Image: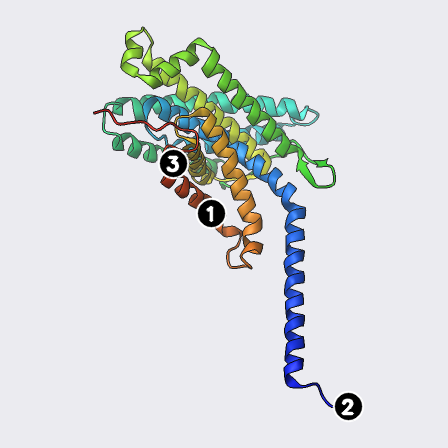
Amino acid sequence: MLAPFPRENKSSQWNECRKFVQVYKRNEGWESMINILPQVLVDGLTLGFMYAVVALGYTMVYGILEIINFAHGDIFMVGAFIGTEVLLISDALGALEGMNPFVALFITLIIAMVLTGALGVGIERIAYRPLRGAPRLVPLISAIGVSFLLQDLVRFTEALARNEFYLNSPALFTGSIPLGSIATIPTKGLIVIVIAIIMMIALTLFVNKTKWGIAMRAVAQDQSTASLMTINVNKVIMLTFLIGSSLGGATGVLFAQNYGTIDPYIGFILGLKAFTAAVLGGIGNLRGAMIGGVLLGLLESLSGAFMGPLTNGAFGAEYKDVFAFSILILVLLFKPEGLFGEAVKEKV
């Protein structure tokens, strides 16, 4: 009869086996994370470019008026609903059948941009211009009031017309494009990135190369001096709201196409993150808003995918917003003007 293993040897064998399993799982986890990294980066870029375009609206208004237009996120939401309603009505009438999807998207973007641009101009005229000389807290409260008004107005209108306010946008683009063997990018995601880049380049050229763009920069520098140089400050501010709101509305259409389902409250969260992106890059800086939006999208996507495995399940994907805002807090602690902003000294 064989003698049993000594207890201490059996225990040491179990410990070695347990360590081997843990190392294997850890290596398997790292291999899995490396495999999905390209796809996570693609998703992060898609989300980041949407943040970037919406952040441009925040930074343009702040650069000229030095107020935070917290209603801008809800203008984005209105654009998403306008675009979705245009596509739903067109689909019900049979107009989408046989139409080139790029033509349908172009028409939808134009309609959404025109209507949201007009909405932005109306908001500036009614809610902001009368308060232009008031303390900064007053227009901020007005912006929050406009935000809630737009949410409830869209909810009431959709509930009255469709008896629901969660809409599913008709998908114009399906399928995906393989990026070798490492990742795939959905066609609609690629279209989001391309259109966002086009809008950002067009805005940059407009601000830097055109007469009205120079006027906008002059008003942002000093309104009083700009008015003395025969620049119509009111028209410049109106144009700023028109452009910023149009870009926000177009991004709403792209959001609805990319994610499918929208509701009246999507503008609050996405607008808050876009504002965070603008602050991260340097509020009032167009380049900073663009890069800040892309960085925030990448951070959110990476943290959502990898936070769980890296913390052994202690923190899951639901903490991705906490991670993103923690990065913002660190940036503001060590560089309050943002990554690309310039420190401004208070005038004595």
Q: Nearer the viewer, residue 58 or 6?
A: 6
Q: Secondary structure at mark 3?
A: loop
Q: Position of residue 159 (x, y in %)?
A: 46, 39
Say whether disc 1 or disc 2 marks the residue closer to the N-terminus.
2
Please state which of residues 215 and 70 is positioned toward the viewer in this rendering: 215
> From mark 3 to mark 2, how far is it between C-alphas?
71 Å
- Report x, y in % for residue 259: 58, 39
Q: Quadrant of the C terminus?
A: top left
* Above/below status of 246 relative to 328: above
| Disc nearest the viewer among 1 and 2 | 2
Q: Given contact means CB atoms under 8 Å apart, are the residues at marks 3 and 1 in contact?
A: no
Q: Which residue is mark 1?
A: 323
Q: Residue furthest bottom?
A: 1
Query: What is the x, y in percent for residue 335?
Result: 38, 36
Q: Earlier in the sequence, mark 3 or mark 1?
A: 1
Say which element carries label 2. Answer: loop
- Residue shown at 54% from the left, 48% from the top: 304
Q: From this viewpoint, is residue 281 visible?
A: yes
- For the residue marked with disc 3, what is the amino acid? Lys
* In this picture, residue 238 sits left or right of residue 34: left
Left-right relation of 180 to 88: right
In the orientation shown, which residue stands out farthest toward the top? 230
Give the labeled residue for mark 2: 2
112 with respect to 173 (left or right): left
The residue wearing badge 3 is 335
